[in-house]
Amino acid sequence: MMFDIAAIGELLIDFTPYGTNEHGIALFAQNPGGAPANVLAMNTCLGGSSAFIGKVGQDDFGSFLRNVLEKSKIDVTGLVMTPDVNTTLAFVQLNEYGDRSFSFYRKPGADMMLTTNEVKKDIINQCKIFHFGSVSLTDEPCRTATLDSVQFAKQQGKIISYDPNYRAPLWNNPDRAKAEISQALPLADILKVSDEEMVFLTGETVLEKGAVKLAAYGPSVVLVSLGCKGAFYYVNSGFGTLRTYDVEAIDTTGAGDAFFGAVLYQLREMNLEMLKALSQSEWEDIIDFANAAGSLTTTQKGAIPAMPALHAIEKCRRTVPLLK
């Protein structure tokens, strides 16, 4: 079986705010989380095929996550369940604008403990795009397992996509984080960063300058997600910013992953040469579609449960105005 996208990385529980009880004490909802899994879920939601490589605990949380992937039609033959370490947990706090901060329970968490010999190379052989992030670069053994897998995928001629997805609490210091994240940039063909991550990695606040510095590492495509301001793209045929859609956002969790998953879904039938040959107007159509996917994800709570279907994205593009 061929997969459009395979991803390696973290699969965890996001405990997201769910109001308060009668005593005013905060309630949390158990949601599936982990950026690589979110990207895959968006792809399968749109009709693509996906496979996940990673590790969870052999506990109730791990079983829940496995079931979520299966229900999302994501192949789980690469998911390892360990009795030795608990599934990783993250508690998400939302401010008044729906923006998030995280507290992680991961010392260690199962996602960190994936080893190179647990990675099913068959899955990498059978995919077109191989996707990874930097959360799996924070600690050994998952760091080596991830980098070995990406290098193997590159040797097999796969398109490599990379979302650094910087989470400061998971790194022992920012300098090490910047060094590790930057070291993986030359492996990427398609790179997606947030505007904050662009500034963190390049020191540039001007989008074009930051994108030029990131592209110098080797990626053919640099995408910068800008939250409610849309997205910036920097490709062979040009660069620009596209505004996103004016929806009523209640939770931004997973919006960047939905955006990136929707980009990769549209590139899934291409090889690297075809991707490099896309015109600026073709890229703008791809980004606009992805902006609609990302914006619709913010209209519901959670990440994977909030991913929109193809018809919803097309309806959004036809009927919802762009955010001014």
Image (tube, helix red, strand yellow):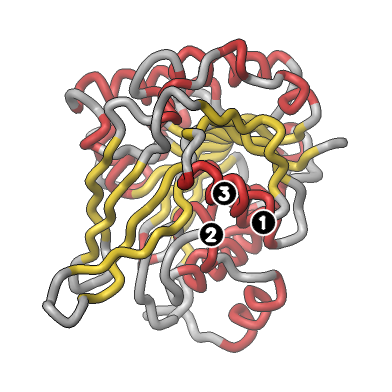
Residue 166 seen anywhere in this rendered image of the structure: yes
Q: Amino acid at mark 2?
A: Ile
Q: Amino acid at mark 1?
A: Ser
Q: What residue do we see at 50% from left, 64% from top?
A: 294
- Per the model, the C-alpha gap separating discs 2 and 1 is 8 Å
SS for dot 1: loop
Q: Residue 59's spot in the image, x, y percent?
A: 47, 39
Q: Amino acid at mark 3?
A: Val
Lower position in the chain sequence, tag 2 or tag 1: 1
Image quadrant where residue 193 sits? top left
Q: Residue 314's spot in the image, x, y percent?
A: 68, 76
Q: Residues within 10 Å of mark 1 (few under 14, many from 20)?
A: some
Q: Residues within 10 Å of mark 3 (few under 14, many from 20)?
A: many
Instruction: Answer above or below: position of 136 versus 92.
Output: above
Q: Disc 1 marks which residue?
A: 72
Q: Residue furthest bottom?
A: 319
Drawn side of residue 130 relative to residue 183, left or right:
right
Lower position in the chain sequence, tag 2 or tag 3: 3
Image quadrant where residue 288 sits? bottom right
